[in-house]
Image: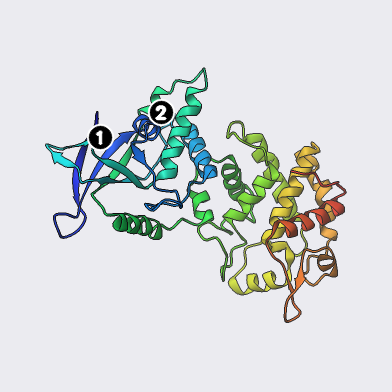
Amino acid sequence: MELVMKAVPVQRGSKEEHQSYVGTLTFGDIARLLNDNHLYVPNDPDLPDLAQRKLNPTRVKAIAQYILETYEDGTTFFPPICVNVQPAPVYQNGYISLPYHSVSLRLTDGQHRCFGIRLALKEIEDHPLLNPTPVSQLEVGVLLYAGLSLEDERQAFRDQNLLVQRPSVSLSHTFDRRSPFVLIAKNLLERVPQFRNNVEMVENNLGKSSKLLTFSTLVKATQYTFPHLKSKDNLEPLMDWTATFWAGVASILPDDPWRPQNPEERFETKQESLAVSAVVFQALGMLAHDLYKENVPSEELIKWLSRLREIDWQKNNQLWHERGVTSIGGSGEPIISNTKTTISACHKILCEFVGLVPISV
């Protein structure tokens, strides 16, 4: 038996032996090749031909879930996988033939995608009401290296991963149109005046920016508010309630610290006020979760939130230090670390002022 692929040659270097090919495989082919051990993944550190990282089952499950959530509307976007063919395949009339008995297909990039594909197909096959055929017929691009040595294969793996740079979390959220948390957060940008044009949408940190907070922080606060939200269906009531909550908080905080400011003003506010810290935004998201679980209607949120104006939000307020929200830096100034422990400590203080018992998410 052999695998026959339609392919296009790609010159990888100045010499003729530096040859590669671009083709495609269906998801069904990927699963079959893995199951039959014809697609070999050199990820065992105990073997001398190691040329991959160890498989991460959590990533495999996440990729499988991504496929299951996106294949129906055609928004499954995968970069090509890379395979080293040993020995170099024969290319003729636009096709390459890969006889199973005489060639080795060694995966150099994309092992988590391939195992995620196989897992997604298995989950569909195990589900009596789903048809696996549409998913098995999806295609992924394949870059085939022709006859790389083990040393070059390892170099290819190193270079492929070294040159990849993940986008910032904020930018990933900005471009996302699937996540219900992102959709709610984007709605907040339109409906809460203090958030409008005052949220950093690209970078993960504010640096010297005069913006109020990063978009990743706002999305994280939304995740704290609705930790079990899975679907983007019927989000309008949640959007309405959440917009009322954040607009209410913004109207109650003393001295309007969330208003748009120039860089100098914002820097001074960051130095002095805890109310503009990422920790507080996330703790407020947890407070919103508590109020939502208590079935507080949107028209009563202002009444519940009104006691937040009694808090002294200055960083040097001893309360924050005593309760573990701030610590004292080397020069004696209060500092706040964006950790789960600090967020939880801040959340408890907010609940006490509002008059709620914190709810575990």
Q: Is residue 202 at all visible to an observer of this figure?
A: yes
Q: Position of residue 198 (x, y in %)?
A: 59, 59
Q: Position of residue 253 (x, y in %)?
A: 76, 59
| Lateral position of residue 176 relative to residue 356, left or right | left
Q: Which residue is pictured at 20% across the width and 46% down the height?
A: 88
Q: Depth check: 69 or 93 in front?
A: 93
Q: Position of residue 21 (x, y in %)?
A: 22, 45
User: Would you call the spot at circle 1 few (<14 residues within 10 Å), some (14-19), or many (20 or more)?
Assistant: few
Looking at the rendered image, the quarter that the N terminus falls into is: top left
Looking at this view, name the residue that lies furthest to the left. 93
Where is residue 272, by image quadrant?
bottom right
Looking at the rendered image, the quarter that the C terminus falls into is: top right
Q: Which residue is pictured at 81% across the width and 42% down the height?
A: 300
Q: Amino acid at mark 1?
A: His
User: Would you call the spot at circle 2 few (<14 residues within 10 Å), some (14-19), or many (20 or more)?
Assistant: some
Nearest to the eye among marks 1 and 2: give it: 1
Please name the residue that numbered disc 1 is placed on.
Answer: 101
Q: Earlier in the sequence, mark 1 or mark 2?
A: 1
| Label disc, if present, on residue 135 of the rendered structure | 2
> Regarding mark 1 in the picture, which secondary structure is present there?
loop
Against 218, is 116 above or below? above
Q: Depth check: 279 or 260 in front?
A: 279
| Label disc, if present, on residue 127 of the rendered structure | none
Against 37, is 188 above or below? below
> Regarding mark 2 in the picture, which secondary structure is present there?
helix
Q: Position of residue 277 (x, y in %)?
A: 68, 63
| Lateral position of residue 139 relative to residue 57, left or right | left
